[in-house]
Amino acid sequence: MPEQSQILATLKEYFGYDTFRPLQQEIINSVFQGNDNLVIMPTGGGKSICYQLPALLLPGITLVISPLIALMKDQVDGLLANGIQAAFINSSQDENEQQDIYQKLIDKEIKLLYVAPESLSFLDSVLAQVTISLIAIDEAHCISAWGHDFRPAYTQLGYLKSKFPETPVIALTATADKATRQDICDQLNIPDATQHLASFDRENLSLEVRPGNKRIEQIIDFLKDKPNDSGIIYCLSRKTTQMLAEKLQNQGFKAEAYHAGIDHQKRAQAQEGFINDTVQIVCATIAFGMGIDKSNVRWVIHYNLPKNIEGYYQEIGRAGRDGLPSSTLLFHSYADVVQLQKFADMSGNKEVQLAKLDRMKQYAESLSCRRKILLSYFGELIEEDCGNCDVCKNPPTFIDGTVIAQKALSTVTRIKEQEPIGTVIDVLRGAQNTAIYDKEYQNLKTYGIGNDIPWRDWQQYIIQLINQGYIEIAFHQNNKLKLTGISKKVLFEGEKISLANLKDIEKAKEAVAQIASKTKASTLFEKLKALRLELAKEAGIPAYQIFNDATLKDMEQHRPMSDDEFMQISGVGRQKMQNYGYRFIKEIIDFSKEKTKKKKKKSNKGNSHKETLNLYKEGLSIEEIAIKRQLAQSTIFSHIMKLYDDGENIDLTQFVSKEDIGTIKEAKETLENPGGLKPYFEHFEGAIDYNTIKLALAILEEN
């Protein structure tokens, strides 16, 4: 195993970072120890480094299984930009290109090889001639029918461990619940894999849910505050993506549709445009984005309700990968639910898909902190509300729900965590049906203790307890309700529970949170973005592969003006410093010089006012001052008004006649004191100029 100093030096040399993110070092050390690993880390959390860095220090090649051609190309382009030897094999290449790569593999000129699962069988003869030090399986959730985006081709990957038993396998995905995690390990033949579950908490993402009425109007209002930001709008149908793209284009937005039914070339152009920042908005079906490593997506909108929380969380995770504040907005309606139920009916695991859809619907209708709900779904429990979702920003009223919670949790305990939500409610309400009597639940102490609460209200209360992390749903066990580690605090330690007042639920469905105003980006940041785009075009790669927005923000803050200072910026490695350092440093220096000039100009402007004041004190008129200073009379007039506003002893009456003051006073009364100067100017049909009107009004205001 390499020394930690060597690992850290490699991190800085090739990736530009001085320290690891949470769990990265632990995972990398486990890889070097030869362990199999399952890594669950949210989008933007730094999964790729967990196998890319070991690949540089391991003796042989690292084989990376990746599901999409675009994803492979994106990853390889990024590695090459960092000075790392990498390549991919897929159907987009001709035979000569592939033969060149095979030869480089044999000659040990490649450290990472990306390949689709469908192409593995064609590589047996080549892989037999090289040393495979590590096998990385990206987007590993694709192997599990319990999860989302299931891909049958992934199910063949279990043979890799049998064929290379001494080679460590690392499986990585952004989202997987307990059932999916277990399924991944079983199918990949790595049952003893060390599981690394990173925090799913993406604090930089704001979460908002709105009813799906007048969606297009709401989207346009949302986008007006984000004129230069990139974003994705996910839609259920192909037709909706095209309709929405056309409407946004008509409003002046650079928007394109993306779905499988569009001509391949047009689809590729839309994706390339988005990657290269020439297309601002992509209206797409859910397949879009999986193969894109674009770090500066600032917002994600779901035009329709997603089919499950895993997919939803992965899709919103495509925003703010660089860690900067980003927005997410979800619309939902009953029509969405009906459509998704039809899709579930046609799936191979209907009951699981319907249960997960119900959970998604509960999230959309929730009156609890949305981040708490998402995190508890993946087994991560937090006590404090996030403060960065629409519910936290516009909280409902709450009731003391401790007794309600104790009754529900106690019932789940007494039925030994073996029933879904409907049966639990039937026990609480003392239902007299076959399901209750067959299992003798009528003999339980909690039978009927909640008969004073309507069935639908019990459903809402239990959903809130699920959302707060006191109960979880075991989807792979017929949706049985299970207690969590914090349930005992309510049952045995007297912890108080607050539940949202159900009377607020209908009001909440109609409430639309106010959209925060966009903070304008600084001039230097915009200049650095423009330079980045220029360099990206020269290199023929996406702008974010030069540097991401977070790195540009770091440059803006620290203003590096030498190679050594530039190397201290987060995200700057040796290769990128050599490739781009000079241009960025020059831009920063030029900006600093320009800013200094502006300060001097502003200082000179103050001196200019002072010079006008001195000439006024000598008794010169505005016309005489203008001639002496070789400036326009309007400029001198503006100086005089500024000096007057600043409290200088200026007698404005010497610049306007008493007759004009009287005439303007009459107009002020006639026009009922209008707010601007234009009504006066139009009232006098241009006979009295704006400067005279302004002077007279200032005098009248003073008197």
Image (spheres, rainbow, N blue to C red):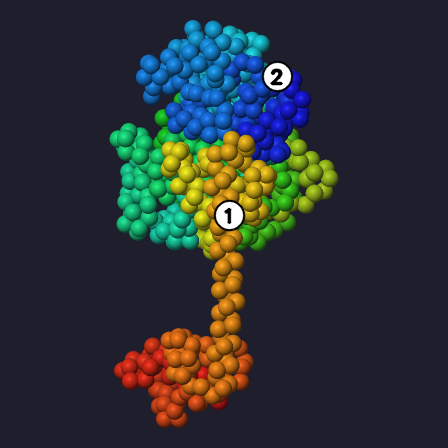
Amino acid type, label 1: Ile
**Which of 399 and 71 lies nearest the eye of the viewer?**
71
Alpha-carbon neighbours of circle 2 within 10 Å: few (<14), some, or many (≥20)? many
**Farthest residue, direction right:** 493
Instruction: Give the residue displayed 59% in from the left and 39% down from the top.
Output: 564
Q: Total label count?
A: 2
**Which of 404 and 447 lies nearest the eye of the viewer?**
404
Q: Which residue is mark 1?
A: 588
Q: Position of residue 672 (x, y in %)?
A: 38, 83
User: Relative to 677, is 161 on the left or the right?
Assistant: right
- Whether residue 195 is situated above or below residue 507 in the rendered picture: above
**Which of 462 and 214 lies nearest the eye of the viewer?**
214
Instruction: Give the residue displayed 46% in from the left and 26% down from the top.
Output: 80
Say which element carries label 2. loop
Q: Which residue is mark 2?
A: 35
The quadrant holding residue 376 is top right
- Whether residue 448 is situated above or below residue 631 in the rendered picture: above
Amino acid type, label 2: Asn
User: Relative to 407, is 305 on the left or the right?
Assistant: left
Q: Position of residue 151 (x, y in %)?
A: 41, 21
